[in-house]
Amino acid sequence: MKRIVVLTGAGISAESGINTFRDADGLWEGHDIMEVASPVGWHKNPELVLDFYNQRRRQLHTVLPNKAHKALVELESQYNVTIITQNVDDLHERAGSNHVVHLHGELLKVRSQRNPDAILNWKNDLVLGDLCDAKEQLRPHIVWFGEEVPMLDKAIAITQEADILIIIGTSMQVYPAASLKEYAPAHTPIYFIDPKPALNSNDKLTVIAEKATIGVSQLVDQLLKR
């Protein structure tokens, strides 16, 4: 069974109603990114950071997977599919995808601020005073700016085994995630789906200049007819 590796970004979740990572002015819903997505911001004002992610978590409970998430699940009938996502939502899992790697963490998990391996499932608000078993404050299980990406090596190893690579809804500007396509084998065809693609088609790369719900459905239909 051929292996498809899918790299997804904010564009696929935006169509479910989840706001994209940041606006053109560098703000994330009115906040400087470093205030709410960095260790410095956490130490400076943890209440602001917790409130920010509590709002994101609440919003996540109100949205549903869209046609693009669901179409990717269909590929599993004929392919070994692994999704590597930059998104922190659980929409791929809710759609039914069985193999999902979260590069930047997960909104529905929290972890000890001192022990990154002490991870808990968490669906409700997180507040100061919520502690792990070691009596340390819990923080969002999110990879912030300036932090290592612990799942990167696993993502690289998966990409190196890809027979087909599909990139969906990402600017290809956020590193190290944007570098993953460079690890695909030389012969591997790459499909890039985005309404405003940052890449151009070539012998190896096919650009589908559509939003995710349209482009993914088109590509999945094509791949399942092979």
Image (spheres, helix red, strand yellow):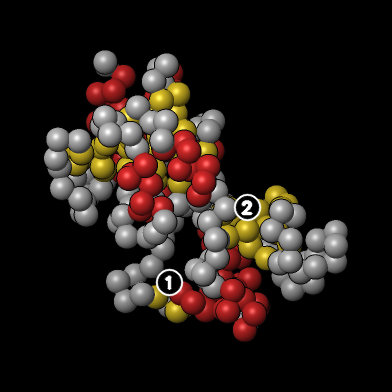
Kindly identify the amino acid type of the residue bearing the numbered disc 2: Leu
Left or right of residue 68, residue 107 in this image:
right
* Mark 1 closeness class: few <14, some 14–19, many ≥20 residues within 10 Å: some
The residue that mark 2 highlights is: 108
Left or right of residue 46, residue 114 in this image:
right
Q: Nearer the viewer, residue 99 or 52?
A: 99
In the rendered view, tell whether residue 107 sits above or below residue 213.
below
- Residue at the location (30% across, 71% down)? 24
> Is label 2 in a helix, a strand or a loop?
strand
Q: Tell me the distance, in whole angstroms, between the alpha carbons under discs 2 and 1.
A: 19 Å
Q: Position of residue 140 (x, y in %)?
A: 63, 62
Of the numbered discs 2 and 1, the one sitting upstream in the chain is 1
In the rendered view, tell whether residue 160 sits above or below residue 27.
above
The residue that mark 1 highlights is: 28
Q: Quadrant of residue 42?
A: bottom right
Any part of residue 62 in sight: no
Any part of residue 225 in sight: yes
Left or right of residue 190, residue 132 in this image:
right
> Is label 1 in a helix, a strand or a loop?
strand
- Residue at the location (58% across, 79% down)? 40
